[in-house]
Amino acid sequence: MRTTGARGFAALIGAAVVAGGVLLAPTAAAAQEKVVLAKGHTDAVDVHYHDGELSLEVHDDTVSPSVSRDPADVIFQVLPEAAMAVPADPRFAFLGPAGSTIWLLPLTQNQDLLWPGWNTTTLGAGTFAGDQIQISLVDVAGPGNVSVFTQDSFGSPLMKFRSDDGLPDTIDVPIRTHAHANWAFSTEGDYTLTFQADATLANGTTVSTGPVDYSFVVGELGGTGPETVLTVSGMADEYQPGDTVTLQAVQTPQTELDHYHWFSRCPGSDDFAIISGEAGATYSFTATRELNACEYQAKLYDDNHTVVATSEEVWLWVAFAPTDPGTSQTITATIDPTQGALVISVDPDDRSVVLPPAQLSSAGDTWESSGSLRPVTVTDTRVGTPGWSASGQLPDNFTGPDGATFSSGYLGWTPQVVDQSAGQGVVAGPVVAPYVVGVGGGLGASAVLGSAPTGSGRGTATLSAGLRLSLPTETAPGTYTATLTLTAI
């Protein structure tokens, strides 16, 4: 068994924000029928409220564009690479004997593992009493124990859900929360976790999702695992001549393979022909009348260049151009290459972050609160793709009642890349911890939120960050505000 103790332990100690996990015990046959998510970001417990009903969905961000799925259609897989040794630290004795193996999905994203979280960002202010809901772990069935927890500034665990000490476990979650945390599983195998979301409306009426089951597999999938299915998304019903067609090859379940070839077959041809130079998951081209009724398919290859999966063909339909010149017009649009710019922006209707009331840490020496930065958009249309860096800073202290203040350095963040254009190479900035005496830190100084290297910055990217506030206990009670300044160069 492969273990990655050093990586897992570092992620365990560094966690600061809680995230939820949802599990169901599938059979090997069921794994063949469901979408398996094994790597990348997903909001596993995605809470929605429509037409008077509270519901749970899965926001799948592992595909582009992202999609919402029914929890019954998804299996979340903790890959064998998530294995690590339990630290020799008595604070983590609840995970098992020191040195024993657990499987950990950490707070900080690891591109080789699943990064599940929970999300209430679609819930509007004023709908629910106290602007919060409750998420409960109602029941667990499986071969081992499941723990979801954060940690205080000294690394001590703060338990949110724990299956071996009695259920249900319930936490309050403010609206507009997007959170992640440590998920620990004690044993490989199939699990069933039943989650439920409840809330009280502003008028006093209670609403509930009722119990909702999710699938989760720790280790290899049962049997030989599901066959990889390849599909092609992005083909519209019809295009006009000159439109851009962008096709995306999507694996189900996801694998580590990333070598593709694209093929086309047009009227008059009996066989598909390879499209030269196209070896990625995305294929873009310009629609013309000559391509009308052509078929396209993608193939996925392993390291030995053996075909692993072949997609069903998709058809391209291109409309006729106007045939009567007397009733037509020609419209020409030009993009001036000298007019490109680098712009950083936020939605003017979504620019306020309200952190939940600070709670005393388990050690009793700090006030702690966490939340999420609202989406930040960086658009680069400059010629030459010189790359860019987006940064944030709180140049002034937080101000509160009667002139009370505290240092902006007590706020830190964990940057995230939410979305980016095809071909971009945007990466999240480093984690900035809140200020600690003798160590420094915090957003009182400029910190990188995200960046794109030379040659891969052109396009539009959406950035965010998990926020963490850690204050001295002598801070005066009250509501404090500060302004985060965002810049891009």
Image (cartoon, rainbow, N blue to C red):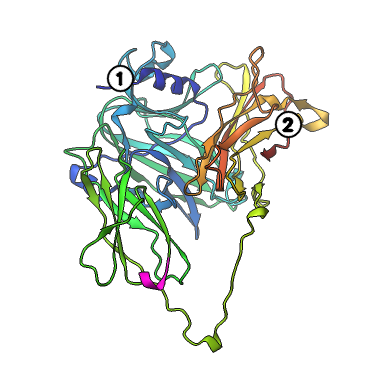
Three-letter residue code for mark 1:
Thr
* For the residues bearing labels 2 and 1, Cβ distance under 8 angstroms: no
Closer to the chain start, of discs 2 and 1, is 1
Q: Tell me the tag on residue 178.
A: none
Q: How many marks do you count on the picture?
A: 2
**Can the viewer see residue 355 in this picture?**
yes
Query: Which one is nearer the viewer's eye here, 271 or 46?
Result: 271
Q: In the figure, residue 188 lies in which quadrant?
A: top left
**Rendered location of residue 45, percent (x, y):** 43, 43
Label 1 SS: strand
Label 2 SS: loop
Residue sitting at x 35%, y 40%? 194
**Rendered location of residue 217, percent (x, y):** 28, 36
Residue sitting at x 67%, y 44%? 352
Inspect the magenta stretch and tell me whether residue 43 lies in it: no
Q: Main secondary structure of the magenta part?
A: helix
Residue sitting at x 45%, y 20%? 10
Q: Tell me the tag on residue 101.
A: 1
**Can the viewer see residue 317 in this picture?**
no
Q: CA distance from mark 2 to mark 1?
A: 45 Å
Q: Residues within 10 Å of mark 2 (few under 14, many from 20)?
A: few
Viewer-nearest of labels 2 and 1?
Answer: 1
Magenta residues, start to end: 287-291
Query: Which one is nearer the viewer's eye here, 407 or 382?
Result: 382
**Rendered location of residue 182, percent (x, y):** 43, 28
Q: Quadrant of the N terminus?
A: top left
Q: Residues within 10 Å of mark 1 (few under 14, many from 20)?
A: many
Q: Quadrant of the C terminus?
A: top right
Q: Tell me the tag on residue 478.
A: 2
Q: Is residue 233 left or right of residue 404?
A: left
Three-letter residue code for mark 2:
Gly
